[in-house]
Image (spheres, rainbow, N blue to C red):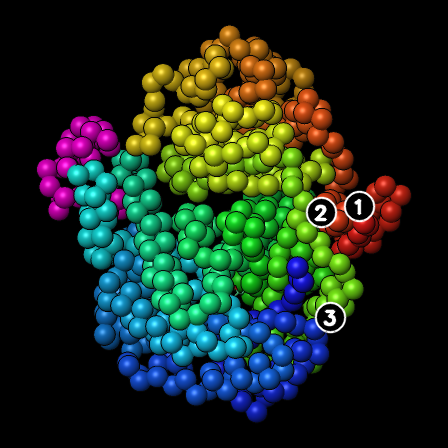
Amino acid sequence: MKRTLGVCYYPEHWPETQWAEDAARMAALGLTWVRIGEFAWSRMEPTPGTYDWAWLDRAIQTLGDHGLKVVLGTPTATPPRWMLDRHPDMLALDKDGKPRGFGSRRHYCFSHLGYRAECAKIVSAMAERYGKNPHVAAWQTDNEYACHATTLSYSNAAKSAFRNWLAQKYQSPDALNRAWGNVFWSMEYSDWSDIGLPNLTVTEPNPSHVMDFRRFASDEVVSFNRLQTDIIRKHSPAPIAHNYMGAVTEFDHFATGADLDIASWDSYPLGFLSDRIPAPADHKLRFVRQGDPDFQAFHHDLYRAVGRGRWWIMEQQPGPVNWAPYNPDPLPGMARLWAWEAFAHGAEAVCYFRWRQAPFAQEQMHAGLLRPDSAPAQAFGEAEQVARELAKMPDVGTAQAHVALIFDYASDWAWEIQPQGRSFSYFWLVFHIYKGLRRLGLNVDILPSDTADLSAYKLVLAPGLFTLSEPLKAALAAHQGTAILGPRTNSKTENFAIPVPLPPNLPGLDAKVIRVESLPPDVPVPLAEGGNLLHWREKLEATATVTEMAEDGWPALVSSGRLHYLAGWPDDQALTRILHRACAAEGVETDPLPEGLRRRDTATHRFLFNYNPVPAEWGGVAIPPAGVHWTEL
Ligand code: GAL
């Protein structure tokens, strides 16, 4: 497969006289894709029902005339101002019941039927007009579902949709009362219309209520997206993508992914490190201009799974962004390294965001490939270099990993609802384990929690899954390899109750969690062989073999053959030891890497990425800061 580059472009931001020159420069730079359209509703439908496609026809034609392929975005993330006059109640309401108003973007409630009908209309009009356009080679639905925390809405539209969803699921209020345990605090309902949304309660609402609301909200995103894909598919053979985000788990991406052809994500490594990643200050300092060495790779692997093998970077950070607490300039070379790392993880395309820095409105401080005066910015030359390198490079097909890590969106909701300790987070637990694997130089495949076949993997990790799905249980039972589960794995029922027999309740492993404790970050639980459990530990009653013991005499890792259960959150030292031991047992070769250096094997090449601000040396190779090195395998 030919891997390609692209860019995000907003023809509506620039005089039409500039389009041809822009397109010529994009083509000369070696770009293939141009994503357009996703915020242009006010220009497509300036007044209700009156469309103006002429400018978009010409923009697409101009790009096509220069040999560029268009990714056409549906504009539903930015309903124009007139929409509010037609549907004053279309706004999402926040947890306090306050409307999320007009004046930026994503100010809609997924459950509002009137807004859905408007979306269906504009998407139909676009798909009819451009579905057979030879230059429209891919579609994007909406833009970054969940961005700005917009999945949950506490509106009347959401409330009535939630009641219908519950009625379908439980069939009778009695069944719902039993499932949720509503006898507790006299919370029993006698009619669907009694049930509210889980906000504005005096103290915490019932976790089962919140969990169902989270599932419902996720389903609303899925059906909103499907409304669009169903329409587009009627008119266009081109593949459909959505652009997901980093560390955003508000809806089940595997579920939306099932209706799409390509998963893509928007990668802003420096923004994420500054804004999202809970890392110690020295880590943030070391990687301030490069980004966390594992955060991008984690999402590449996650979205490869969401896209069932097909995935892109739809937006790649080109220089300083505008939205993080601090917005440093990337180290020269990073805009190239990030792109190559994506290709090494199997990306079909990497598109930079954006072509030219906008001198107006919210994102005027956000870099592009061009400065506002149209001169090349730092990333322009780096993109040019990647394009030249790609042209010379034979394909870098994805290799089969030996290690699988399970990721489950619903588990993230569950532990957000009931963390039981401020520092317990499912997402960061999984990411922590992923980092441990990457430090050992391993390729990792991420799999969904309903995976039914693990036979390709020698080592499987499933930390923190709140329930075990039936397919996964069967796959684990049949697995001929090492599996490490826990902490918290299988510790709730689907209805969010503690199961009896007590967890983890794994066939063949005699171990029972009899007590759990959460701990402040400065209260470690030392392990006999060194290292600690942090944040979370479980006390086990077990006859299974104790493989790791805490200094206080409680088991920390118990094993029965190749099935292991981890009774806490291991720190780096303990995690490395546990992973090393598991890899050795399965004959998986490890390559412990120096800080900030990462390795990725493709079917044909071994890549090394130096995320450090200083040179790195490995295997006799010197790699400069922000350097990428590859050799044929
Ligand atoms: C993304 C978004 C883009 C732009 C970009 C800025 O989250 O999809 O529209 O806002 O961030 O970094």
Q: Is 466 within the magenta?
A: no
Query: What type is the residue that disc 2 sits on?
Result: Ala
* Element type where label 3 sits in the image: helix
| Dot placed on the residue nearer the N-terminal end, 1 or 3 | 3
Give how far apart the Cα atoms at labels 2 and 3 are.
Answer: 25 Å
Query: What type is the residue that disc 1 sits on?
Result: Leu
| Dot placed on the residue nearer the N-terminal end, 2 or 3 | 3
Write the start and end of the magenta stretch as one range.
172-199
According to the picture, the residue beneath numbered tag 2 turns out to be: 603
Residue 159 in view in this figure? no
Mark drawn on residue 633: 1
Q: Residue at x 57, y 91 (%)?
A: 17
The residue closer to the viewer here, 577 or 562, is 562
Q: Position of residue 164 (x, y in %)?
A: 20, 48
Q: Are marks 2 and 1 in contact (CB under 8 Å)?
A: yes
> Relative to residue 568, is residue 43 depicted above or below?
below
Tell me: is circle 2 under 8 Å from ligand 1: no
* Element type where label 2 sits in the image: loop
Give how far apart the Cα atoms at labels 1 and 3 are.
Answer: 26 Å
